[in-house]
Image (spheres, rainbow, N blue to C red):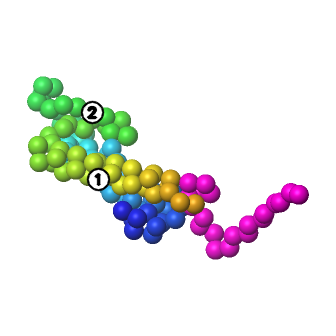
Amino acid sequence: SSGINAEYGSTEQWIEAHGLAARKITRDQVLRKIGFKAAAGYVGALKKNVKSRYSLDMYSIVKDEQGHNVYLTGRAEDLLVQETALRTLITDISDRIEWLQTGSRAKFGVVTERRVIIVLLSSG
């Protein structure tokens, strides 16, 4: 839609407002919604550090951006929500690219400055 595009002239502004991070669908954000980290830390009652262990074949395991194991538990409904969010983003990006390729934007890009100087050169 043109409204989502015209509101944010520069691509940087558009990505900040409508990109993965703005929609909370970065890799780690999705992993938090469909999985859990292994618990680890100091337990005062035991007076020692402990780390949760899970059956290796009970969950699929992936690493988050910090290198910690995340055990995937996503239900079909959770995964469908994430798929829908990603499909919506892909549609919005396609619309943005199409919008950028129309009219004068195709030749000059998006002009975000308040003032523009046009220089015309003519010969003979």
The part of the image, by quadrant, that contains residue 107 is: bottom right
Q: Distance between the Cα atoms at labels 2 and 1?
A: 25 Å
Q: Furthest residue to the right? A: 124
Question: Residue at 29% across / 53% down in the picture?
Answer: 88
Nearest the eye: 59 or 124: 124
Q: Can you give x and y, in whole percent of width and height, for residue 71 in the image?
A: 20, 37
Q: Which mark is residue 62?
A: 2
Q: Is residue 74 left or right of residue 116?
A: left
Who is closer to the viewer here, 43 or 119?
119
Q: Quadrant of the N terminus?
A: bottom left
The quadrant of the image that shows the C terminus is: bottom right
Report the residue that reaches farthest toward the front: 124
Crowd tier of the residue under label 2, counting other residues whose Cα lies within 10 Å: few below 14, some 14–19, many 20 or above: some
Of marks 2 and 1, which one's residue comes earlier in the chain?
Answer: 2
Q: Which mark is residue 88?
A: 1
Identify residue type, mark 2.
Answer: Val
Magenta highlight on residue 121 = yes
The magenta segment is: 105-124
Q: Main secondary structure of the magenta part?
A: loop
- Helix, strand or loop under label 2: strand
Q: Is 113 on the left or on the right of 119, as rendered?
A: left
Residue 64, placed above or below residue 98: above
Instruction: Kindly identify the residue that appears in the image at 39 percent across and 54 percent down.
Output: 95
x, y percent for residue 6: 46, 67
Q: Residue at x 33, y 51 (%)?
A: 91
Amino acid type of disc 1?
Thr
